[in-house]
Image (tube, rainbow, N blue to C red):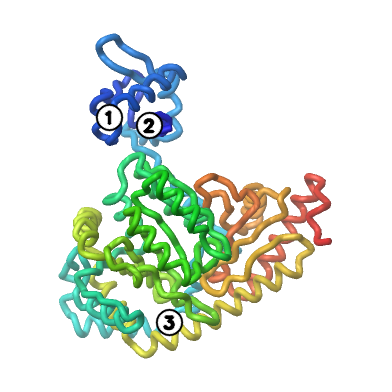
């Protein structure tokens, strides 16, 4: 099994253009050292590659890439007009977002009209009055100390946890935090647990580091902890990327009863839990359970708390909470990435976050988002299509199951032609499943646009079903 993983690793690197036609592969000894495996395991992988005519052997020289196999790299390499080549980087979610449409249900961002734009502009002026030389200074890679002090006190009050400002790093959004953590935690072929489904950009980031993704089913009832323990025993994963609170894309919430048990499993099997919490304050009725980080005493949980979504997406502020053993390598990775999140955005966020206006904004925003969710559900319920979903109690998305015969990819193609977009479920699945599921975000469009867009989506789904002669799409 391990030799097959090395086989896949080599094929992936060939397809990405790391090795071209007739390039020599690393020696068995050096690759075994690099991947921390037995030399016999690498030898078996090389023999399998030879058997499948992916490589050929030069006696007393080594293994070389077959020309026919290297040809598959063409799709993975971008060649500029001057002949310089660059690896193609995959971001399926970004590819969808870049398409301009009238009815935008693929982007899980807040309608700018719901944000406190006038108040933020006032705080921008206030910040430059307080810090007149602000534009002439860098932040430290770890983040502004004044902001880290504020967030430290905030979390100590709200969660009664021991914390100091040295255990926080400010990143330019949660996605950067995921990328930096993957760089310091993952080596090629390392096992990483991910929810199924999960945030599609995280799949692309983790795969970009060469991780072996091990799926964990996430349902409205939470995880199967016994199954997770079996996976941890079998694969010894380096990390578990998770989104347990108003999960993206499903909106599910991991029950409080499972959170402490999961931290105990992480400690027992030495698996870092990366807890991505972008929607914590976007609840409609009850507050969500405490983060897993609050149960961690030995440094096995890294907590990502993003504030970009509902304060001001343009500020791109995420706080990473972790114990000292994880903070130091994270600061080093951050310094190499951008040497620090812009100081001006940190200061603006700092002064707005501690204002009374912030809490008023959150309360109004929850109400507005709940109304938009209700409008979307009302239109979906009125449709004569047997699609299914679980009502989210917070967050920005509805995870919708289409009738099995309707392909989400085909529906997306039709929808884009009618200026409507959503996220097809398969890009949220490390196994490329969920072919009949879609993520609909209700946070960007207003109520009128949601009604019009859902009616358009219903009509397109009906036409697609009729075209392929599937009368069973209707509710019975």
Left or right: 204 as drawn, with respect to 326: right
Work out whether 382 lies above or below 155.
Answer: above
Label 2 – label 1 distance at C-alpha: 10 Å
- Residue 80 is tagged as none
Q: Which residue is mark 1?
A: 31
Name which residue lies at 53% across and 63% down: 222
Local crowd size for mark 3, using a 10 Å CA cut-off: few (<14), some (14–19), many (≥20): some
The CA span between labels 3 and 2 is: 51 Å
In which quadrant of the rendered image does the N terminus lie?
top left
Please determine whether, in this image, residue 194 is positioned above or below residue 158.
Answer: above
Q: Give the residue number, with chain letter if any, for mark 2.
A: 6
Position of the C terminus by quadrant: bottom right
Q: Check disc 2: other Cα within 10 Å, few if <14, some if 14-19, many if 20+.
A: many
* Whole-number angstrom distance, CA of label 3 to CA of label 1: 54 Å
- At a point 45% along the width and 63% down the height, the residue shown is 243
Earlier in the chain: of badge 3 and badge 1, it is 1
């Amino acid at each position: 099994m391990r030799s097959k993983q090395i086989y896949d690793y080599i094929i992936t690197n060939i397809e990405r253009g790391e090795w071209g036609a007739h390039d020599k592969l690393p020696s068995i000894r050096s690759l075994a050292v690099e991947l921390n495996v037995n030399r016999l395991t690498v030898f078996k992988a090389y023999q399998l590659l030879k058997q499948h005519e992916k490589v050929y052997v030069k006696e007393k020289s080594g293994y070389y890439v077959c020309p026919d196999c290297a040809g598959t790299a063409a799709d993975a390499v971008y060649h500029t007009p001057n002949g310089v080549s660059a690896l193609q980087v995959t971001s399926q979610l970004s590819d969808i977002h870049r398409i301009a449409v009238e009815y935008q249900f693929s982007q899980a961002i807040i309608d700018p009209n719901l944000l406190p734009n006038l108040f933020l502009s006032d705080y921008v002026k206030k910040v430059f009055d307080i810090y007149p030389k602000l534009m002439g200074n860098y932040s430290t890679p770890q983040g502004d100390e004044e902001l880290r002090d504020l967030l430290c006190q905030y979390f100590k009050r709200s969660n009664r946890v021991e914390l100091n400002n040295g255990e926080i790093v400010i990143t330019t959004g949660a996605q950067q935090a995921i990328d930096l953590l993957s760089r310091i935690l993952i080596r090629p072929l390392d096992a990483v647990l991910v929810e199924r489904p999960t945030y599609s950009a995280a799949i692309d980031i983790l795969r970009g580091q060469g991780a072996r993704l091990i799926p964990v089913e996430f349902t409205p009832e939470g995880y199967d902890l016994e199954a997770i323990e079996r996976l941890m025993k079998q694969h010894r994963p380096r990390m578990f990327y998770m989104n347990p609170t108003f999960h993206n894309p499903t909106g599910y919430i991991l029950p409080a009863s499972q959170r402490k048990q999961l931290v105990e499993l992480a400690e027992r099997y030495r698996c870092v839990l990366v807890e991505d919490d972008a929607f914590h304050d976007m609840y409609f009725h009850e507050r969500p359970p405490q983060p897993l980080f609050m149960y961690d005493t030995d440094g096995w949980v890294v907590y990502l708390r993003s504030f970009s979504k509902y304060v001001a997406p343009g500020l791109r502020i995420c706080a990473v909470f972790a114990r000292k053993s994880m903070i130091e390598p994270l600061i080093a990775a951050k310094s190499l990435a951008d040497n620090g999140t812009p100081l001006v955005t940190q200061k603006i966020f700092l002064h707005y976050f501690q204002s009374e206006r912030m809490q008023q904004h959150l309360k109004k925003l929850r109400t507005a988002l709940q109304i938009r969710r209700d409008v979307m559900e009302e239109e979906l319920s009125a449709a004569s299509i047997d699609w299914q979903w679980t009502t989210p109690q917070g967050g920005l998305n509805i995870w919708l199951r289409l009738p099995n015969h309707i392909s989400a990819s085909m529906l997306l193609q039709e929808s884009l032609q009618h200026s409507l977009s959503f996220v097809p479920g398969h890009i949220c699945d490390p196994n490329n499943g969920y072919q009949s599921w879609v993520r609909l975000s209700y946070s960007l469009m207003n109520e009128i646009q949601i009604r019009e867009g859902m009616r358009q989506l219903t009509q397109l789904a009906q036409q697609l079903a009729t075209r392929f002669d599937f009368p069973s799409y209707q509710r019975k």
